Image: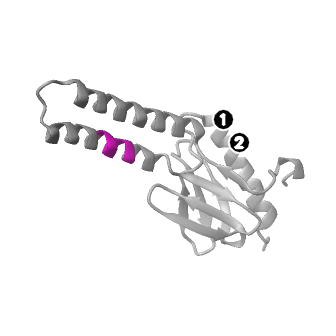
Amino acid sequence: MTDQTDIPALPVTFRPGRTRAVLLGAGVAIFVVLTVIALLIPGLSTGERTSFIFTGALLFGVLLLLSRPKVVADEAGVTVVNIATSRRLAWAEIIQVNLRPGDPWVFLNLSDGTSLPAMGIQPGIAKAQAISDARALRALADARTPQG
């Protein structure tokens, strides 16, 4: 049974904040370092300098893409944004919210018999926060999913 005080106010967004900060910080650092190297090394052609900067931008883009995951819950349902996909779910579609020991992120068991990874809640760097977020999402799903 879920206590009403455990249920967060909607809308609420769950995302791995520390992981996101590390990825974006690393992306900026990589881009800046490669750009500075491209500008400071004497004797590089314009094409070589451009390729250094392009490589930095490409690596930043990859890390930006990896920092994209989030789970947004509102009154109508949940939007799960993973690295390359986004899916909108009604509350009734979510049967169970799982974060088992060793799981890389939360999995949502759905009414169609499938399971959807919700990468916006992941215990990698901030395990306690991920557990808290998973419990909050579970409480929201339990409160809004018809029992039957």
Neighbor class of circle 2 (other Cα within 10 Å; few <14, some 14-19, many 20+) is: few
State the residue at coordinates (62%, 63%): 79
Residue placed under numbered mark 1 in the picture: 128
User: Of helix, strand and loop, which one carries label 2?
Assistant: helix
* 5 to the left or right of 93: right
* 135 to the left or right of 124: right
Quadrant occupied by the N terminus:
bottom right
State the residue at coordinates (47%, 63%): 85
Could you tell me how many numbered marks the image carries? 2
Q: Does 58 lie within the magenta span?
A: yes
Quadrant occupied by the C terminus:
bottom right
Coloration of the structure image: one colour
Neighbor class of circle 1 (other Cα within 10 Å; few <14, some 14-19, many 20+) is: few
The reply to whether discs 2 and 1 touch (Cβ–Cβ < 8 Å) is yes
* 37 to the left or right of 111: left
Residue 62 rendering spot, x and y as whole percentages? 37, 47
Q: Amino acid at mark 2?
A: Ser
Residue placed under numbered mark 2 in the picture: 132
State the residue at coordinates (58%, 60%): 80
State the residue at coordinates (53%, 35%): 21
User: Of helix, strand and loop, which one carries label 1?
Assistant: helix
Q: Nearer the viewer, residue 104 or 47?
A: 47
What kind of secondary structure does the magenta stretch mostly adopt? helix
Q: Nearer the viewer, residue 142 or 5?
A: 5
Q: Nearer the viewer, residue 103 or 72?
A: 72
Asked whether residue 138 is in view, the answer is yes
Residue 131 rendering spot, x and y as whole percentages? 66, 42
Residue 41 rendering spot, x and y as whole percentages? 18, 24
Q: Amino acid at mark 1?
A: Ala
Q: Looking at the image, is 19 positioned above or below residue 1?
A: above
Q: Nearer the viewer, residue 74 or 58?
A: 58
Q: Point out the stretch of residues depicted in magenta.
A: 56-61
